[in-house]
Every structure is written in C-alpha cells, then in structure tokens.
Image (spheres, helix red, strand yellow):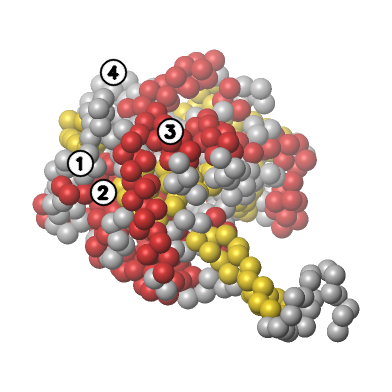
Amino acid sequence: VEMGCPVEATQCGSVIGSVDSTRQATSEEGYGQQYLSRNPAEWDDVVARVRLDGPDTLVSAARQARRAQREWARVPAPVRGRVVSGFGRLVESNKEALASLVTREIGKPYTEALGEVQEIIDTCDYFVGEGRRLYGQTVPSEMPDKQLFTFRAPVGVAAVITAGNFPVAVPSWYLAPALVCGNAVVWKPAEYAAATARALAELAWRAGVPEGVLNLVYAEGEATFEGLSAALREGLVDKVGFTGSSRVGREIGELCGRHLQSPCLELGGKNPMVVAADADLDLAVEGALFSGWGTAGQRCTSLGNLIVHRDVHDEFVRRLDHALREATIGNPTQDVLYGPMLDRKFADRFEQALAETASHHRVLGSESTGRITDSNPRKGFRGDHSTGLYYHPVMVDGVRADDFLFRNEVFGPIVGVTTFETLDEAVELGNLPGYGLSAAVYTTDPGTAFRFREGINAGMVSANNSTSGAEAHLPFGGNGESGNGSRLSGMWVIDQFTRWQSLNWDFSGRLQKAQMDVGAV
Ligand code: UN1
C-alpha cells in the first residue's frame, strides 16, 4: 500500500499518518498492479494509490486471522468491548478529518459524511455494552442433578467484503460486532474507497485491535472471489459478510452454500414509497427528494419506485418536479443535495440505465438528462462540472410495472412514478420487483400504515419518513433480491457472529440418559 496523505495536512495528521510497510502483504505473480482511488468531484485528484492483491494474499490473511483469533477469543468479552469503545472514541476525535476524507474519496456531501461517521460511533457505542452482555442461558434439565447452559461462541474468522458508498458506517456494522464477539476479520473494502478503509483500519489497530485480528486486503472482484473460494476450501473462513449488488451476492451465496455456510448478505433494493391520498404532500416531497436523489441515489436504501395515489398524483408530481428543479447539485464540500457519482464505474452503469429508460418516457425534474457538462448545463450548479462525475436528476412519470426502471435497481439519481387506487394494489406494486429491503408509506391514517407494514415484503418499513436513514441499533437487512434474511446491527447481528453452544453438566455421579431416564426421580 502506497498512500499519500489523503486529506490536507492540517486535517490529516493522526488519521492516516505514515503507512507502515511491514503491514503490506507481499505481492504475487501477476498481481500487484496499482489502483488509483480518485476524487469523483475532481478526477485529477488522486486520493490514494494502492497495490491490488491477488487471491493468495487473501488466503494468507485468513491463515493469519485463524492464528490470531484463538488468542482474541480468550480476551474477556468486556475487554474486547473496551477496545471497540476505544476505536469509537478515536473515530470521534477524528470525526471531521474522516468525514472530509469520505467526501473527497467518494463525493458524498460533507454533512452526510459527518452523519456517516456518527453512525460508526453509535455502532461502537452500542457494542461496548454487548461485550458486557453476550448473554447465555441456564436451562432446566429433564433429569435431577444436572444443569444445562447455553453460551455464545465466536464463529471464528469472518471475511467481510464491503461496498464503498458507505465506506465507514457499513464496515462498522460487521467489524464492531465481529470483534466484540471474539472473531478475527479479513476485510476487503471497495477499492474506490481505499484511503477511507485504510484510515479506519489504522484507527482500529491504534485502539488495540491486534493486527492479525483485523486484516485489510485490497483486491478486485475476481481475485477476491478466487481467494475466498480457496480460503473456504481450506477451512480458513467461517463466516462471509457481503454488502453489495444482488448479482455478486448471489454468487457469494452459491459459493458459501457449497461449503455449508450461510453468509450474511446485504444486497440491493428497489425500495418503494407509497404516497396515499391523505398524505401530507410536502412531507412526502421532502422524503422523496432526500431518499430518491440524495446521495445521488447511491444507497441500497435509496427510493426506487414512487407509487402515488391517483387522486394526488398530479399535485405531488408538480411539487416534486419543482423541488427537483430548485435542488442544488455540485461539489460535495458545499451545501448540495448531491454530489458526483461514487466512481467512474457507477457513472458508466448509470448512463447505461438512462439509455434503457429515460429516452422513452416523460422525464421531469430537470431540463435534461445525463452528465452535466458545458453543453448540457444545469441551472444553479455549484462547482466545476468539467472535473466531476455529475448527473442531472431524473424523474420518470408514467412508469409501468413491466418497465426496466420499475423492476431493476439503478443506483443513480433517477426515480420512476406510477399510480395506484387501492392500498392492496400499492402493496402489490411495492412487492413486484422482488427486492425487500426498505419501504415507506406517507399517510395520516395509522391503519393504512399498519396494513402497509403487514403486506410489504421489506426488512425495514417507514411511515411518514423516507426509505433511507435507518438507525444504527435497529435490525438492518432485507429479503428476496435484497438478501438472505440476515440482519445487521443491534442485538440481532450477534446471531451472525456467534454460534450457540450448549453445556450439559451432570453432577449426579451416574450415567443419566436423556429421554430414557425421564420420570426416574
Ligand atoms: C447502504 O446503502 O448500504 O439507512 C447502507 C441508510 C444508511 C445506510 C445505508 N444508514 O440509508
């Protein structure tokens, strides 16, 4: 890893410091090419240069993790909790620097980046307490002079593969519980958020997480997959955590299945927002704007389909169109609704999706579609569009249930609008794309909200709030195309990083046989 100071010297200091070369994994034959992590708002600004590792590096990291995990599991859980607490405190004292780094590396508006850093702090705070709980149970036995107990045992080594749209918060959902529960981790972050990952790992090591317990590997998709396959074959990985696309999630799920493992998969979403006839329309417009176009639509919880009651459709779309035209887009260091796309590959994919959809629909919210350039400008744009991956916001009205846009996650600043008449119809439309991450309903009738919650197949449902912005201590995760039902965050994630172990303690001094000795008293 070769990395210049990723933020201005005044902000950098303790976040990154110098990179210790002894922590570098050795490069393998055929690998080791450099990857440049660039600022998507200023493409010439190289935030970090990293060397990409090959599959063998991932395997040797897993081997190292296997060795280190045994020691770590012997550290008492409350002490492991204190280490995670120290990590949270270090993040907190570097909050602004870390948020600036996130803004610079992935183009997330600074205020959102601060929120994201807050999310890791909250997560660490939560899991300090878990270190003092990790409760097991005492269970009565069917036989006398015998006591049963249950314990939570660490799973062992977790391989964690994370996307870069939440380069701080999402990794913490895996790292904090995995570490508190006594596991070691091999972490493969998104390469386009390499500097942020490095900064986080540095802070964790500095807080006292042993190096072998947290291993950072940079690798591209194919090398990661190959390395993971080999590590699973060798029995070096006990749990895989993955946040990313449904397509890759399915491949990882298949791979894990072959090794009898159930991974933790947090995948895409086509999150619906239903606007009922009795909704507070201004509130719904605000929610749609934030979750549909905020973060340039690049959250897994971003709004995908707006499902609006026929009676309020015209008025709602008129107000949202106005809000979109007024919204400020541009440099993420400024006060903007959204900045650039995360990276060039996301910009390219968004252009493909636009070509699939925007050209044959009624487009609202903007004068134009596509990349914002000199010849395709946007009113009120802030910053320099010639250097950044900026796109016009797009709202597509009159989307039908079999349209590409209705069925597929796009991961960009585009939302389709469709109408409904009955709540049953709205729920059916919401479930139709087959994802099941997040969903929202705007209504002033509690009955509508509860019926929506019952009918919609989503891990997270909001009433009168947007599809994005889940809190750090609620179960996070989805169903269907959005994941395999695993949940991160709060007490629920503990089930991902521990396995129940029972102890059956007989102090009768004779061989008591379960089932057969019942009633022998
Ligand atoms: C993601 O996009 O992978 O609920 C996570 C939210 C954020 C996390 C999103 N707290 O929108």
Dot 3 corresponds to which residue?
225
Q: Is mark 2 within 8 Å of ligand 1?
A: no
**Contact (Cβ within 8 Å) of mark 4 with mark 3:** no
- Residue 435, compared with residue 156, is above or below; it is above
Query: Which quadrant of the view contains residue 421?
Result: top right
For label 2, the residue is 198
Residue at the spot 39% in from the left edge and 59% down from the top edge: 69
Q: Amino acid at mark 2?
A: Arg
Identity of the amino acid at label 3?
Answer: Phe
Query: Residue 169: horizontal and vertical position, in percent?
Result: 40, 53
Within 10 angstroms of label 1, few (less than 14), some, or many (20 or more) residues? many
Q: Earlier in the sequence, mark 4 or mark 3?
A: 3
Q: CA distance from mark 1 to mark 3?
A: 21 Å
Q: How far apart are the alpha carbons under marks 1 and 2? A: 9 Å
* Residue 4 visible in image: yes
Q: Look at the image and tell me in which quarter the N terminus lies.
A: top left
Disc sitting over residue 1 in the figure: 1
Q: Secondary structure at mark 2?
A: helix
